[in-house]
C-alpha cells in the first residue's frame, strides 16, 4: 500500500486547507459551537461551488466521480476545524444510500441537487438514540390507499435541522424494512432540535406523513452497502480532528510553564500526549487502509466497521486526554478543544457505537453458522 498523496491530492489538500483558513477560522468555529450553529448557508454554498458536495457522485449525476481517497483528503481538512454542517450526512451518506438502491427517477431528482447544495438530504435511520441497526427501526411505513404514510419518531438525527429531505428507515406492514424519501416541509413532518451537550442533533417526528410509492425503495442491506463506502470518509474527518487536537495540545505543553518549566517535561503530561497520538495513528491507518481498499475494488465491509469503531472511540478518548492537559482553560467554550469535545460526543453513537461496529466487523469476518 502506497499512501503518499498524488499531485492532484495535494492540490485538493491545499485548497481545503486554504478554505478553512479563510472561511472557518478556529476562533469563529468555537463561537458556532458555543451557539449550537449547525448549518452555515454561505459556507455551504461555497463548498458546493468547489464541488465538495458531489465528490463521490458519478459524472452522470453532476458529480466529480472522485475516488474515496481523494474525498478523504478533503474531509481530513474539514475535520481539523471541525466544520459544522451536513457535508458528510448529505454529501456522502445520503448520496451513497441513493446510489445503492434508489430508483433511477429519484436519483435523477435528488443526486444533482445534493451535488450543487440545493438539497440537503439527511438519513433518519435508527429510532432510539442508544441503538443502531435493523433491530432499532420501529417507525412504521403503513399502506394507505395508493400510497404510504410514515408514523413514528427518530430521536437522534444528525444534521436533521438543516435537512430539506429525509431518507427514513421504516418498517412495512409485513415487518420488512424499507427506505422512504420525504420532504421536510411535507405535512405531518416536524423537527425539534435536541438540547444538551450536542450539536446538530434533532428529533424528527412523522404523524401520518404521506409518502409517494415512487419514493420508497431498498431495505436495510441498502443502508449497509452505503455504510461501507461512507464510514471511511467519516473516519477521514475524525483523523483530521485528532491531528488538530494533537498539534494544539503538544504546542500547549511547550508554552505552559509550571514551577519554572514547561508542563511537557512532566511524565503524566507526556503520557496524555502519547495517548492522543496513539488514537490518531490507529484512526489514520485503518481509515487510509479502508479508503485504499475501496479504490482498489477490494471487500471493505469489515474494515469500514472497524474504521468507525476505532475513529469514534479515538475521537472521544483523544478529547478526554487533551482535557487532562488543558484542565480548566479547556472547558471554556471559546477554547478550540470544546468544539471537538462536543462533536466527539455527538459522533460516538452516530451510525453505531464502537461496540456495535466491532460486533458488525466480527459478524462479517466470521459469519455465524446456522
Image (cartoon, grey):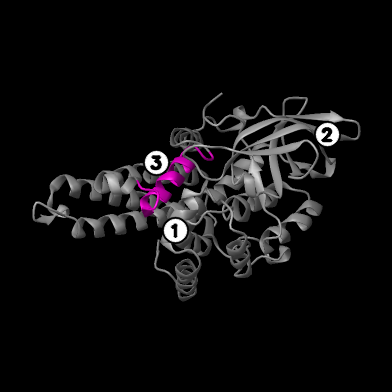
Is residue 65 in sight in this rendering? no
User: Pointers 2 and 1 in contact (CB under 8 A)?
Assistant: no
**Secondary structure of the residue carrying numbered label 3:** helix
Q: Residue furthest right?
A: 145
What's the CA distance linking mark 2 and mark 1? 41 Å
Q: Nearer the viewer, residue 40 or 55?
A: 40
Which residue is the site of mark 2? 148
Q: Main secondary structure of the magenta part?
A: helix
Please report the residue visible at 84 percent of the width from the left and 40 percent of the height from the top.
Answer: 213
Q: Nearer the viewer, residue 329 or 213?
A: 329
| Residue 121 spot, x, y in % from top left | 68, 50
Is residue 326 in sight in this rendering? yes
Q: Nearer the viewer, residue 145 or 18?
A: 18
Disc number lying in front (1 or 3): 1
Does 288 lie within the magenta span? no
What's the CA distance linking mark 2 and mark 3? 39 Å
Which residue is the site of mark 1? 81
- Give neighbour class at mark 2: few <14, some 14-19, many 20+ (Cα, 10 Å): many
- Give neighbour class at mark 3: few <14, some 14-19, many 20+ (Cα, 10 Å): many
| Residue 82 spot, x, y in % from top left | 46, 55
**Residue 264 relative to residue 364: left or right:** left
| Residue 223 spot, x, y in % from top left | 63, 42
Which residue is the site of mark 3? 313
Which of the two labelled residues, at mark 1 and mark 3, occupies the earlier sequence position?
Answer: 1
Which of the two labelled residues, at mark 2 and mark 3, occupies the earlier sequence position?
Answer: 2
Q: Which residues are magenta?
A: 332-351
- Residue 280's disc is none
Q: Residue furthest left?
A: 260
Amino acid at each position: 500500500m502506497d499512501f503518499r498523496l498524488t499531485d492532484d491530492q495535494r492540490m485538493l489538500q491545499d485548497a481545503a486547507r486554504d478554505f478553512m483558513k479563510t472561511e472557518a477560522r478556529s476562533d469563529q468555529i468555537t463561537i458556532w459551537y458555543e451557539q449550537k450553529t449547525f448549518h452555515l448557508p454561505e459556507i455551504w454554498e461555497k463548498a458546493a461551488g468547489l464541488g465538495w458536495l458531489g465528490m463521490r457522485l458519478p459524472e452522470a449525476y453532476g458529480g466529480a466521480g472522485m475516488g474515496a481517497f481523494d474525498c478523504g483528503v478533503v474531509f481530513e481538512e474539514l475535520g481539523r476545524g471541525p466544520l459544522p454542517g451536513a457535508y458528510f450526512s448529505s454529501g456522502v451518506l445520503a448520496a451513497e444510500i441513493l446510489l445503492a438502491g434508489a430508483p433511477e427517477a429519484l436519483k435523477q431528482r435528488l443526486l444533482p441537487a445534493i451535488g450543487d447544495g440545493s438539497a440537503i438530504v439527511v438519513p433518519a435511520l435508527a429510532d432510539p438514540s442508544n441503538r443502531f441497526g435493523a433491530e432499532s427501526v420501529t417507525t412504521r411505513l403503513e399502506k394507505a390507499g395508493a400510497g404510504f404514510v410514515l408514523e413514528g419518531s427518530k430521536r437522534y438525527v444528525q444534521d436533521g435541522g438543516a435537512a430539506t429531505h429525509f431518507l427514513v428507515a421504516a418498517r412495512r406492514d409485513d415487518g420488512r424494512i424499507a427506505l422512504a424519501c420525504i420532504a421536510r416541509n411535507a405535512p405531518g413532518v416536524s423537527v425539534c432540535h435536541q438540547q444538551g451537550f450536542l450539536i446538530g442533533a434533532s428529533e424528527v417526528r412523522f404523524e401520518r406523513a404521506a409518502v409517494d410509492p415512487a419514493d420508497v425503495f431498498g431495505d436495510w442491506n441498502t443502508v449497509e452497502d452505503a455504510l461501507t463506502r461512507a464510514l471511511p470518509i467519516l473516519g477521514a474527518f475524525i483523523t483530521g480532528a485528532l491531528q488538530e487536537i494533537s498539534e494544539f495540545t503538544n504546542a500547549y505543553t511547550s508554552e505552559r510553564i509550571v514551577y519554572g518549566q514547561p508542563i511537557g517535561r512532566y511524565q503524566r503530561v507526556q503520557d496524555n500526549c502519547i495517548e492522543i497520538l496513539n488514537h490518531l495513528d490507529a484512526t489514520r491507518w485503518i481509515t487510509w487502509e479502508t479508503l485504499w481498499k475501496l479504490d482498489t475494488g477490494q471487500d471493505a465491509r469489515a474494515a469500514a466497521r472497524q474504521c468507525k469503531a476505532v475513529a469514534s472511540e479515538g475521537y472521544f478518548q483523544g478529547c478526554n486526554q487533551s482535557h487532562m492537559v488543558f484542565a480548566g482553560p479547556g472547558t471554556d467554550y471559546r477554547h478550540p478543544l470544546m468544539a471537538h469535545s462536543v462533536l466527539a460526543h455527538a459522533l460516538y453513537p452516530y451510525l453505531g457505537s464502537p461496540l456495535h461496529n466491532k460486533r458488525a466487523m466480527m459478524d462479517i469476518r466470521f459469519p455465524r453458522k446456522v
